[in-house]
Image (cartoon, rainbow, N blue to C red):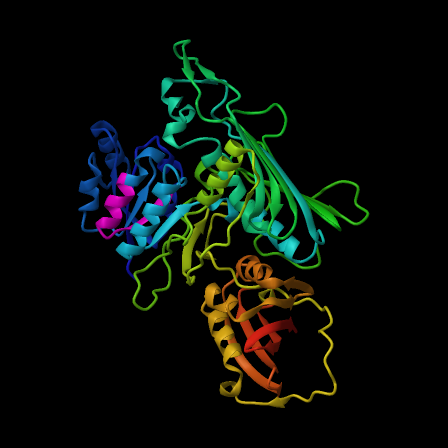
Amino acid sequence: MKTIGAGIIGGSTGGWASISHIPVVTASPAYELRAVSTSRRGSAEAAAARYGVAGYVNHRELLAHPGIDLVVVAVKVSEHLELLSAAMEAGKHVYSEWPLGNGLAEAQHLTELAEKAGVRSVIGTQGRYAPQVRYAQDLINDGYVGRVIGTTMVGSGMVRGPEAATRQAEYYYDNAHGATPLTSPFSHAVDPLNHVLGDFEKLSANLVVGRTEARITADGGTVPITAPDQVAVIGTLTGGAAASVFYRGGTSRGDNLRWEINGTEGDLVLSADWGNMQVADLSLAGGRGTDTTASAPGGPRVVLRRRPARRPLPLHDRQCGPVRAVRPRPRRGRPHGPRLPPRPGPAPAHRRHERASATGVAQTRRAPVRRPRHRARARAVDGHRGVAANIEATCFRFSSHSRTPSHAPAPPRNDAMTAQPVNPSDLPGIVTRYLRAHAARDTATAIGAFTPDATVTDDGRTYEGRAAIERWLDRAASEYTYTTELTAAERTDAEHCTVTNRLEGDFPGGVVDLRYRFALRDGLIRRLDIAP
């Protein structure tokens, strides 16, 4: 397989890319660092000498390099639009640091440009891949906390506090630059929250400029603060849970990051000394039942993604190596690599937060227009574990039936109805359509197979209505790769049939047989029950 040639814009020896992207690219046999560019000749020459690659001052020289397949943009947000546009217009696949653009309009423009150029593209919101976040998601899906009824998150932006070392920090204090507590640390933290618990259905937000100036310790002067440094959001998630998120600029003498997830049967707590979740060294604790305090959560099954015993890690390992997803399996008619999601990351949520703060009116999430979502199996270096790992670089996540099956009783059956084996080709067309869409990770087509009031029961949980079913399709246990084989089909009458699928993959146990019982109405699926 061809090695991917990487070029990094913002590849100076002292920049963010030097402790995040470059160590991972150089450690992986899937990639080869071939060029860097910086804004100054001296830093470009220093980077070229250290990394043994071509060094450029003009990014267009890097884009003209014949060996560059992938361009990583790791510079100020205000420069993303120009650099990402140039890279995609040159036919290069791109990895953009978050925020994608300076505001929603730029993010939407870049998303459309990626679609038009036919290139693969990734946004660096890697916090959701932290092993502690993924383990918490597994525990929730396995019923550790029962039904989630509320969540609270409090964090610090670490920078953007009352003082800064040099005037270069003015970039973080000026709202016009787009690198604010809302767009950066807040959004990096809310992305894992939404990934695990669902998006905001409605919310109210308050953005406050708490400090009006910051002191520069190098010269004793001050710089004005125009970016809101106090971000408060309260609302309801799509699953019905209450949510409260508060982020502040600077640091706290208390907790710099604490995320609680509270359920009917237990609680989970993720915490860290560093408030930027995407690079934080997280700790996970939990308690349920008769527990009076939260401790390291345990359970009857082993979760393979749990972090090993603590040991000293180099900085780039603790940073969770953002270049974690750019060698996918090729797909017919499309170039290699993962794509930008149809919605430009949390940008629409930013707009709701800003609108709620400005108007004082709670904002309700509009149902998104969804496009087909395609899986890209990616080879990545997981900095937390320090080993190569396979991940799903995709917005679509397969449903919870890929986990170790529970032993919840199957839904009752009508004994008066006798099911007869049939050829899969004789199944109702809507069932075949759903199964194909589900296998293809095409959420838009799959959700269209259900009636508006449909219900799905899976792993002992029931999802009522298209919105809940879409959420089930989109967010339940997403961490495994698997294949599906239809092994049996039965039909009771024109409106009832059962399909048995065998799933084989890298989930615990490796193999599971699941029965999908369909009940139809007016040519659509009104009920789907899934059980072993």
Q: Is residue 46 magenta?
A: no
Q: Nearer the viewer, residue 1 or 102?
A: 102
Where does the image place residue 261, in percent across and percent down from the top left? Answer: 66, 44
Query: In the figure, 471 relative to 6: above or below?
Result: below
Where does the image place residue 89, in percent across and percent down from the top left? Answer: 23, 49
Q: Residue furthest top?
A: 220
Where does the image place residue 1, in percent across and percent down from the top left? Answer: 30, 62
Query: In the figure, 348 relative to 454: above or below?
Result: above
Where does the image place residue 446, in percent across and percent down from the top left? Answer: 50, 68
Q: Nearer the viewer, residue 76 or 455?
A: 455
Q: Residue furthest right?
A: 290
Query: In the figure, 137 relative to 172: above or below?
Result: below
Q: Residue at x 60, y 77 (%)?
A: 521
Q: Nearer the viewer, residue 202 or 103?
A: 202
Q: Residue at x 49, y 39 (%)?
A: 187
Q: Nearer the viewer, residue 168 or 176?
A: 176
What span is in magenta?
82-97
**Residue 233 visible in rendering:** yes
Q: Quadrant of the C terminus?
A: bottom right
**Residue 259 visible in rendering:** no
Q: Residue at x 52, y 47 (%)?
A: 128
Q: Quadrant of residue 151?
A: top right
Q: Is residue 131 left or right of residue 35?
A: right
- So how many labels did they put on this image? 0
